[in-house]
Image (cartoon, coloured by chain):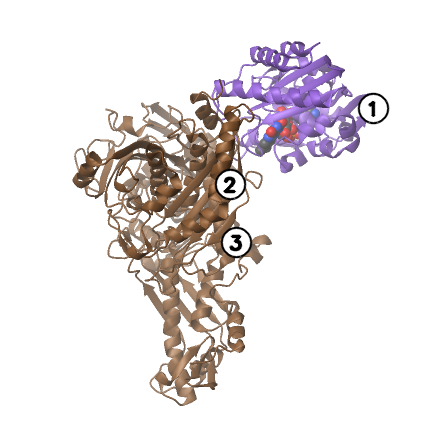
Chain colours: A brown, B purple
Amino acid sequence: MNDMSPDRAERSEKLNGLGCSRKRVEDARFTQGKGNYVDDIKLDGMLSGDFVRSPYAHAKVVNISTEKALEVPGVLAVLTATDLEPLNLHWMPTLAGDKQMVLADGKVLFQGQEVAFVVATDRFAAADGVEAVDVEYEELPVLTDPFEALKSDIVLREDLEKGADGAHGPRKHHNHIFTWEAGDKDATEQVLSHSDVVAEEMVYYHRTHPCPLETCGCVASMDKVNGKLTLWGTFQAPHAIRTVVSLISGIEEHNIRIVSPDIGGGFGNKVGAYPGYVCSVVASIVTGKPVKWIEDRMDNLMATAFARDYWMQGKIAATKEGKITGLWCHTTADHGGFDACADPSKFPAGFMSICTGSYDIPTAYLAVDGVYTNKAPGGVAYRCSFRVTEAAYFVERMMEVLAIELNMDAAELRRINFIRKDQFPYQSALGWEYDSGDYHAAWDKALAAVDYAGLRREQAERIEAFKAGHTRKLLGIGLTHFTEIVGAGPVKNCDILGLGMFDSCEIRIHPTGSALARIGAISQGQGHATTFAQILASEIGLPAESITVEQGDTDTAPYGLGTYGSRSTPVSGAATALAGRKIRAKAQMIAAYLLEVHDDDVEFDVDRFVVKGAPERFKTMKEIAFAAYNQAVPGIEPGLEAVSYYDPPNMTYPFGAYICVMEIDVDTGEHDIRQFYALDDCGTRINPMIIEGQVHGGLTEALAIAMGQEIAYDDMGNVKTGTLMDFFLPTVCETPHYTTDYTTTPSPHHPIGAKGVGESPNVGGVPAFSNAVHDAFRAFGLRQSHMPHDQWRVWKIANDLGLHN
Amino acid sequence: MIPAAFEYYRPRDISSAVSLLDQFGDEARVIAGGHSLIPMMKLRMADVPHLVDLQDLDELSGIEVGDTIKIGAMTTQYEMINDDDLADVAPILREAALQIADPQVRYMGTIGGNVANGDPGNDLPGLMQCLDAVYSVVSSDGKRTIPAREFYKAAFSTARKDTEILTSVSFCAPKGGCAYVKQKRKIGDYATAAAAVQIERQGDRCTAASIAMTNLSDIPVWSEAAASALLDTGVDEGAVKSAVSGMLGDIDPAEDNRGPVAFKRHVAGVILTRAISSAWARA
Ligand SMILES: Cc1cc2nc3c(=O)[nH]c(=O)nc-3n(C[C@H](O)[C@H](O)[C@H](O)COP(=O)(O)OP(=O)(O)OC[C@H]3O[C@@H](n4cnc5c(N)ncnc54)[C@H](O)[C@@H]3O)c2cc1C
């Protein structure tokens, strides 16, 4: 072995590999306005498309007259379902095994649904064309409540065969989509009926929207000469889109090129396939010209994928001492007019079964019923792994409710129920194998960091002062310990449309010792070009600065399932490390040859191979790279390249402890977040600065969701929150200061022990903010109040508790 | 979010602007900062075939500070905030303008557009009613003035004729103490409830008061009942309570995404109480 000479540390530092806060290489172009987004793409003769959208939530489409629109100068075509039908493109498959209208086929099922597609020479003419299309509707009764939908005689989906199974088994009612179950129902009911204490509550996680700064869009260009279709778009999963386009259009996959250029945030909104993509492709095929379609903000909020909308009825059982004995959950999931959730095929409710959270719960049962309503389709994983935020919110609310029931401190209740370090790998009652964790250590660190006991003392004093009339502000302490399940996932049980959820990396080392790595994942702002180069730098001993990471072009990138569900680092990152190791294995043979020793007599040392026991005899990776191209090494092919496709053996289970301290003005419903402490354990930390940035961003989205952001409908199915005036996106003024912290518990099965972190803050943040609001009113009798906790709803809590009298 | 086609005009003097309005009647609209009008055009809720841009009309800008304060209609909210003389004499203008929207909007949005717009959500109309301002308008028929307290008829409907251009807003330098308190959901939001209060005081007595509320009816609400409840009192808790109940008799809020009526009425009372107490402390 080599000595730990300072020289070695210095060499290691030069690589900018794992663990260093390397500045993001993407930022130079983003901060200078030099990014290249879909809407920046301008092609010769490019046309523009825009949708006529339904003003009604449920209506028959009696007639569409396009004559006047076709008279608008610049308008070339107006596509309707009738035009798409001969191509069998008036409907398209969804990722959830349902089908969705591309353009209204006789009826509409939600406000904002695509009815006709106007193609014009420019964006302005297209908008004028949209105004001139005359659609005659006959309004139908509207269902916006999933519970009512399950009882109603009104049939939303006449296209589905009566009584026939859906994609996930039997349908119980014409507005029912699926029932999905996990765990042991009978055993759980037994436990519930025999436990000392059972707390029951309905926990609603309202409908909201990922609302990326850049909306969805694409440019389709069909080259009729060579038969090749190129589609640039805001795709979080470009390869999956290529396969889908091929399957529905009949164009062979090698003749389709999908490119995701720079993407301005995705958060799940850009995973699915949308009518805009199909219509743009058809319009390009019909006109022979490139066609661009870009959503505006209202289109985006109204029509492309929403998130959440889970009604979670829960029961949690425990002993008098607070040891949890069982958890029961029945969820009614509002999926809107079509089931277009983006979940792995076998998981119609995603990984909702992670809802036992961080706790050692011996018995549990979960059932989820999916329901059709007159709302937009979607149900995507908004900055979380599939339905994991819903699960975390559910269990973290149930813990608070149980604490109330037991009259116990909520921090202590969590502590006595955590899965212990020695229980990992831990088999959960709902079927998951948690890879690693040290929850007690994280929890104790968090409580100490905020002086939890001191906060509780202050809170008790505040309550007294409030009762004595000295203050109108209450203090809430919001606790959360979350466990995520990310990195989908093992091909044996995770696929999307039959495509296994592996991921990939392809590396080429250039003769002069720099490298190009291509990955199957795609950044929407996460900084893959920075962090994946760091993974490789540590694996192959070349500086991160000398490694270019390319992604998003299906003609060059290896097949992968894209970026969402925190899967990039766990899956594509693992492929990258393993491809790096293949490079290193070949480099070892070349080095041994050059050093004239046996392969086993050299070992890797940061940026070189050294002869064991003779560190002065070495070949650097740079020298080895050159040798790979200019030396004939017997028995070894020239060049230095590797490909790795990685099928993860398990998911990874990041976790964290978040604490929010919030002041609430009882009279106005306003809040002020005094302190927010976020401890994340994402295993091996690749780039601490990027982790911190991800945590800040995710917490801010969590703040938005918990404190005001929603997609609300009125009884007629009209979207009430269709612009950013009403849909809450926090600015710097609403965003509090965050304190970040960490512990490190590597994943035992991941090549570098990393777990993924981009989504943790949203998963843990929402319950932390929400619990703070609830906690402020706990002393006055509040058990449960649904999000979002905007001013009037917080005011209403106080009002209902009689605090205004 | 693409407006319908329109003709764009950029007159160099008021008389050409006025004659464009005469020529096109209700097919024409003037545009100032555009931060209320352009969104309406993009949503195709305002149909404006002829758009007359006022930005080259230098006569409409500038702030004159004396016993009477006169602010040209094209003065931006940003300029109002940054005018130190104005802030010395009438600090409430800065206080209120800083609560409008966000800096980007305030760079563009003008006082004239804000008061002429007729949106019950706008903050300056209530403030101008509180300060008893008068609006000067001009048309081909000549000039006239309209008191702010008589200007607002219904949402987006005002005493200004389609052919009139608002040239300036004037009011006496406010005496006593003033406060503008606004509750909103977030930066960039219109008021859930806002109160403009001016109080004059002699010793422990309130000698004059004026109170106006924003976004609690389809027009700004200048509440004489609220103000008179304070007159000749020590602005003690009882007086404030009757001012609040006077105000509650005058407002008529509607439910929207900011909340139900009961909430708005409650918040209106809280906000007014806070505004009175800070105006009284400053008086
Ligand atoms: C996101 C956002 C948030 C906002 N929040 C607030 C807020 O919190 N409080 C608030 O008060 N305002 C708010 N506003 C509105 C903003 O203050 C506008 O700038 C203001 O209402 C209109 O001023 P403008 O100069 O932009 O007028 P424009 O939009 O150009 O015009 C508005 C109307 O007034 C008419 N008009 C303009 N000038 C004249 C004139 N000289 N004579 C006759 N008619 C005229 C126009 O024809 C038009 O009908 C917000 C705006 C936005 C976009």
- Left or right: residue B166 versus residue A402 is right
Say whether mark 2 is within 8 Å of ligand 1: no
Quick one: label 3 or label 2, which is nearer the N terminus? Answer: 3
Where residue A123 is drawn, which disc sits there? 2
Q: Are marks 1 and 3 on the same chain?
A: no
- In the image, residue A626 above or below residue A26: below
Residue wearing tag 1 = B66
Q: Residue at x 27, y 46 (%)?
A: A347
Q: Can residue A54 be seen in this view?
A: yes
Q: Are marks 1 and 2 in contact (CB under 8 Å)?
A: no
Residue wearing tag 3 = A36
Q: Where is residue B203 in the image (x, y as percent from the top left)?
A: 76, 15
- Marks 3/2: CA–CA distance: 19 Å
What quarter of the picture does the N terminus of chain A occupy?
bottom left
Q: Where is residue A28 in the image (x, y as percent from the top left)?
A: 58, 58
> Which chain is mark 1 on?
B
The single residue placed furthest to the right in the displayed view is B66
Q: Can residue B21 be seen in this view?
A: no
Where residue A552 is drawn, which disc sits there? none
Helix, strand or loop at label 2? It is helix
- In the image, residue B4 above or below residue A715: below
Quarter of image, ligand 1: top right
Helix, strand or loop at label 3? It is loop
- Marks 1/3: CA–CA distance: 53 Å
Residue nearer the viewer, B206 or A68? B206
Image quadrant in which you'd find residue A734:
top right
